[in-house]
Amino acid sequence: DTAVSQTPKYLVTQMGNDKSIKCEQNLGHDTMYWYKQDSKKFLKIMFSYNNKELIINETVPNRFSPKSPDKAHLNLHINSLELGDSAVYFCASSRDRGRTDTQYFGPGTRLTVL
Amino acid sequence: GQQVMQIPQYQHVQEGEDFTTYCNSSTTLSNIQWYKQRPGGHPVFLIQLVKSGEVKKQKRLTFQFGEAKKNSSLHITATQTTDVGTYFCAAPTQGGSEKLVFGKGTKLTVNP
């Protein structure tokens, strides 16, 4: 059983389109995250939800909108895609939001904007 | 904001050589975590250090947390080709929102 799963694995789209990435975790964790990893491998947090409540919202363009229908799912919708949005997006989850809680990452979604 | 500086950015070694990556912070850390990302893969948790001066071992990997809890290192003895990947340290921010700040990673390549 995959602990944290994401779909799709690859996403190739044109500039200006709207796309969504889905994430699900079956670990029973309360907290989920979206990270962006750029071409230089730098991992940067975008959003975090705890029990469906948004708790972290980094300086991300408002074209990015996360949605958590329940604590096992965290989706990411991106409007009006731009070239600079090309990256690998990782979903992750942790037991809770505590400082010692380790994070479990999904396999990633490689987004390419043409 | 809080930053965790990680060096070196790249390291290429011959199989059998040792490897070390370092993380430094200007502020005291409550704990530090290490992750490994294989090429084309996702970050996978390796270990967490919490106590000042803590040393933990996982087979050929040795993790240390500095006495002042401002630095940490990961040392691999006698590298193997299976060790290739990017190693990240990560530490939670102080106060406010609880989030992990990742170092920029050290990409390790091993020549067989």
Image: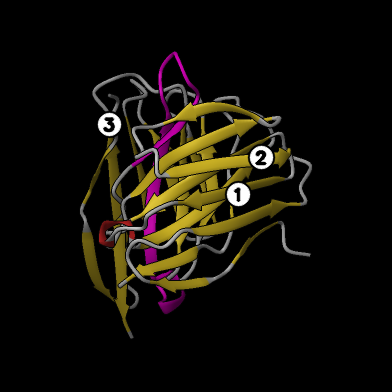
**Nearer-the-camera pick, B98 or A24:** A24
- Asked if the residues shown at circle 1 and circle 2 are in contact, with their CB atoms under 8 angstroms apart, the answer is yes
Residue shown at the point (25%, 72%) measured from the top left: B13
What's the magenta region?
B79-102
Chain letter of the residue carrying label 2:
A
The chain under label 3 reads: B
User: Which residue type carries mark 1?
Assistant: Asn
Q: In which quarter of the image is residue A31?
A: top right
Q: Is there one chain holding both mark 3 and mark 2?
A: no
Residue B90 in magenta stretch = yes
As rendered, which of A30 and B33 lies closer to the eye? A30
Q: Residues within 10 Å of mark 3 (few under 14, many from 20)?
A: some
Q: Could you say which disc has been placed on residue A75 in the image?
A: 1
Q: In this view, does B40 lie to the left or right of A84?
A: right
Residue B17 seen in the current view: no
How far across and down, in percent of the image, does residue A99 sit?
A: 54, 25
Q: Mark 3 points at which residue?
A: B3
Which comes sooner in the sequence, label 1 or label 2? Answer: 2
Tag 1 near tag 3, CB within 8 Å: no
Left or right of A91 in this view: A27: right
Task: Check residue A68 in the rendering and tell me which mark sits there, or answer none.
Answer: 2
Q: Which residue is drawn at 36% across and 71% down?
A: A14
Local SS, label 3: loop
Select label 3 or label 2 by which is in front. 2
Disc ID at residue B13: none
Front position in the image: A93 or A113: A113
